[in-house]
Image (cartoon, rainbow, N blue to C red):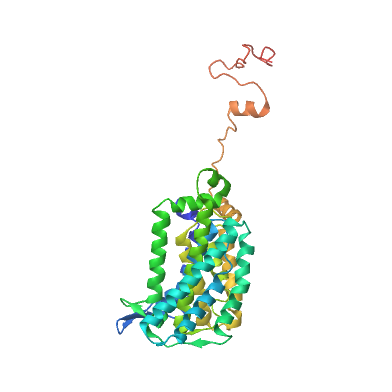
């Protein structure tokens, strides 16, 4: 029980449970899940489906933050990936064919790998601060997406491509399946191999890790490439869901939601230890918050304010000082002293007087073999 109360996931899990219960009170059918045409439907399924793109980006952001970095360009990568894929589809000889969808998806993912390699080059090789290095692509990337789409919203009609946003696999939404498989692969790769330990070592002390023989530059470069790849997959999901590429709004501020999900889950921005489970909980909290706003009827303009208030409360409950204060208040008071007061030995130590031997009730001998004031003690 004590281990549970000290877990950094305690308050995020309680916050998620409180949000779910609140939605259940407002909407008694919130937990209802039904099967229609072999597919799962329900509010909980919608929460998982809509949280999948943010979760994907947050997974990549978790690894980047664990390496003592940050990636502000993932939102721009989302816009670029959707723009490239949709532009490739409308330019294909047969825009509705499965082959055109495969080419469009492959092209978008390939460009994302190059963008991630660019970020990794700036951070790991050139030594530029991560927030500055990724800010370059954050500002320029959305302009690149606007150039690709010529400032227009490109609509597509391709069933294979649309499956990423609205399809199902074994009755489960495709977005949930893809995000779950990527999460499982990352968890196995980082927790069942030495990669996770090396990543934490680089995040805690990059110089010490380098001196210990860890190829810190390669690890940092790799996590930025993976973060861009995860953002591209999320961008394909978002554009496939609406069957269009909107370079101006696609992925707007999604990098902030990803960072919030990572931090809510207990991963420190200082680098080092990280929690993929906490990232999943953080992404679900943010999406459940959005669903709650729509359920209650709060105006969309107030969504960010409502989200900020709840996030601040969760952060305060996670703060070490506040948790220490709460722990001291829950701690039982020490038992009272015996009626006789302090023992003779303890009183002698506090007052500076001689310690009386138990058997003779005389001053105990000092180091020099004498008693009393200790004039014969070693000087």
Residue 181 in which image quadrant:
bottom left
Q: In this view, does 3 lie to the left or right of 348?
A: left
Residue 41 in which image quadrant:
bottom left
State the residue in front, 376 or 371.
376
Residue 110 visible in this rendered orientation of the protein: yes
Q: Is residue 138 above or below residue 352?
A: below
Residue 322 in which image quadrant:
bottom right
The residue positioned 48% from the left and 55% from the top of the image is 7
State the residue in front, 372 or 156.
156
Residue that protrudes farthest toward the front in the picture? 93
Residue 30 visible in this rendered orientation of the protein: no
Q: Position of residue 200 (x, y in %)?
A: 50, 52
State the residue in front, 169 or 82.
82
The residue positioned 49% from the left and 67% from the top of the image is 113
Say which quadrant the C terminus sits in. top right
The residue positioned 58% from the left and 47% from the top of the image is 207
Q: Is residue 165 above or below residue 215?
A: below
The residue positioned 58% from the left and 66% from the top of the image is 313
Q: Where is residue 185 in the image (x, y as percent from the top left)?
A: 39, 62
Q: Position of residue 203 (x, y in %)?
A: 54, 52
Q: Where is residue 33 in the image (x, y as percent from the top left)?
A: 35, 78
Q: In this view, does 324 lie above or below 53?
A: above
């Amino acid at each position: 029980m004590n281990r549970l109360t000290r877990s950094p996931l305690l308050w995020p899990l309680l916050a998620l449970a409180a949000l779910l219960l609140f939605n259940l009170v407002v909407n008694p059918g919130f937990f209802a899940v039904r099967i229609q045409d072999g597919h799962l439907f329900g509010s909980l399924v919608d929460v998982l489906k809509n949280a999948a793109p943010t979760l994907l980006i947050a997974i990549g952001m978790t690894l980047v933050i664990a390496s003592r970095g940050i990636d502000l360009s993932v939102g721009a990568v989302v816009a670029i990936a959707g723009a490239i894929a949709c532009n490739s589809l409308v330019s294909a000889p047969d825009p509705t064919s499965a082959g055109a969808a495969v080419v469009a998806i492959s092209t978008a993912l390939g460009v994302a790998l190059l963008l991630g390699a660019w970020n990794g080059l700036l951070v790991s090789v050139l030594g530029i601060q991560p927030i500055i290095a990724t800010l370059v692509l954050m500002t320029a990337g959305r302009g690149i997406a606007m150039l690709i789409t010529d400032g227009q919203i490109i609509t597509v009609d391709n069933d294979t491509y649309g499956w990423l946003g609205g399809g199902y696999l074994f009755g489960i939404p495709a977005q949930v399946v893809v995000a779950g498989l990527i999460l499982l692969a990352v968890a196995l790769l980082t927790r069942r191999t030495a990669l996770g330990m090396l990543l934490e070592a680089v995040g805690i002390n990059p110089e010490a890790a380098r001196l210990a023989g860890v190829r810190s530059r390669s690890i940092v470069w790799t996590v930025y490439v993976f973060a861009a790849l995860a953002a591209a997959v999320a961008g394909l999901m978002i554009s496939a869901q609406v069957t269009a590429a909107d370079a101006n709004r696609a992925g707007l501020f999604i990098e902030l939601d990803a960072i919030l999900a990572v931090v809510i889950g207990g991963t420190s921005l200082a680098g080092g230890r990280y929690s993929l489970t906490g990232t999943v909980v953080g992404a679900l909290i943010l999406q459940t918050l959005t669903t709650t706003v729509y359920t209650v009827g709060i105006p969309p303009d107030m969504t960010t304010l409502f989200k900020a208030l709840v996030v601040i409360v969760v952060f305060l409950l996670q703060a070490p000082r506040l948790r220490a204060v709460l722990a001291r208040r829950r701690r039982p008071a020490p038992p009272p002293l015996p009626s006789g007061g302090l023992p003779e030995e303890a009183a002698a130590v506090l007052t500076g007087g001689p310690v009386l031997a138990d058997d003779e009730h005389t001053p105990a001998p000092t180091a020099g073999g004498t008693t009393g004031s200790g004039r014969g003690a070693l000087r």
